[in-house]
Image: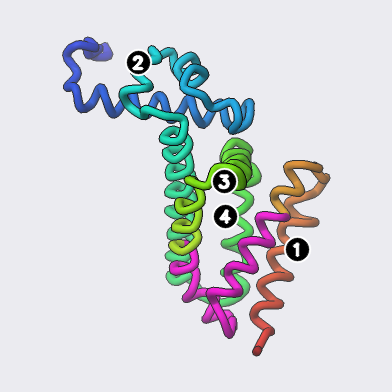
Amino acid sequence: MDVVIAENSVPASRKGARTRKDLLDATLRIIVRDGHQQVTLRNVAKEAEQSHGSIAYHYGSRAALMSAATEFANDYLYQRSCDICSRWRAGSADLESFTELLVEFYLDYLVRDEAMGTVVLELNLAAAREEYLRPILYKWGERLQNIFEEPFRKIGSPNPAMDFQLFLNAMNGVLSAQRSFPRRQFDSRILRSSIIRLLHAIACDNG
């Protein structure tokens, strides 16, 4: 038989952490379903089935909710990126294996996981108008640049930092276009070929 813990017997810190998670999950659901403009304290409280006072206590403002959502998405993709680079180092550590791992990364975490793909797109759009989100995105870009510097350098990039930014911006454009205008056989015909062509162009650029 499952043990049911009464609400009033859960330590306050655990209850607070659980409430914050519920509110963040509700924020992400609204972003995916309705867009980032619909994230308000009232809408999130309703989605999470929490009181307005509870959300005001734990987050205090819409900006805090949007910042938390951005931090969550960035941390999630950063950890997945670290895994990709670790697997590359543990394998043959060549251009072909790096290409396949990046194809797998984009397919698994930003294409097939439609919710995460939508969250990333919406948060980038939000940052275009809401300046307080930009430092979070800048920090994320710097962290990614640091972990991808080694593989980009080893595949032949003369300027890993610049080439990574080129690759990242190009892939953001490819994914955004697919969200706006879905194309058939996107995985093989567009995404894979885009990654292959970008990485091979970078590897062949000697200055």
* Residue in view at x 47 percent, y 56 percent: 140
* Residue in view at x 59 percent, y 81 percent: 157
Quadrant occupied by the C terminus: bottom right
Residue that label 4 marks: 105
Sooner in the amino-acid sequence: mark 3 or mark 1: 3
Which dot, 2 or 4, sits closer to the camera? 2
Which dot, 4 or 3, sits closer to the camera? 3
Q: Quadrant of residue 34?
A: top right
SS of the residue at dot 3? Answer: helix
Viewer can see residue 193: yes
Mark 2 to mark 4: distance in Å?
Answer: 40 Å
Tell me which segment is drawn in magenta: 144-173
Residue that label 2 marks: 53
Mark 3 to mark 2: distance in Å?
Answer: 27 Å
43 or 18, which is in the foreground? 43
* Residue in view at x 46 percent, y 30 percent: 62
Residue that label 1 marks: 193
**Residue 181 location in percent, x, y?**
81, 43
76 in relation to 2, above or below: below
139 or 33, which is in the foreground? 139
Sooner in the amino-acid sequence: mark 2 or mark 4: 2
**Residue 132 location in percent, x, y?**
48, 46
What amino acid is found at the position of numbered circle 3 in the picture? Answer: Ala
* Residue in view at x 26 percent, y 25 percent: 16
Sooner in the amino-acid sequence: mark 2 or mark 1: 2
Q: Name the mark on residue 127.
A: 3
SS of the residue at dot 4? Answer: helix
121 in relation to 3, above or below: below
Say whether residue 62 is left or right of residue 171. left
23 in relation to 140, above or below: above
What amino acid is found at the position of numbered circle 2 in the picture? Answer: Gly
Sooner in the amino-acid sequence: mark 3 or mark 2: 2
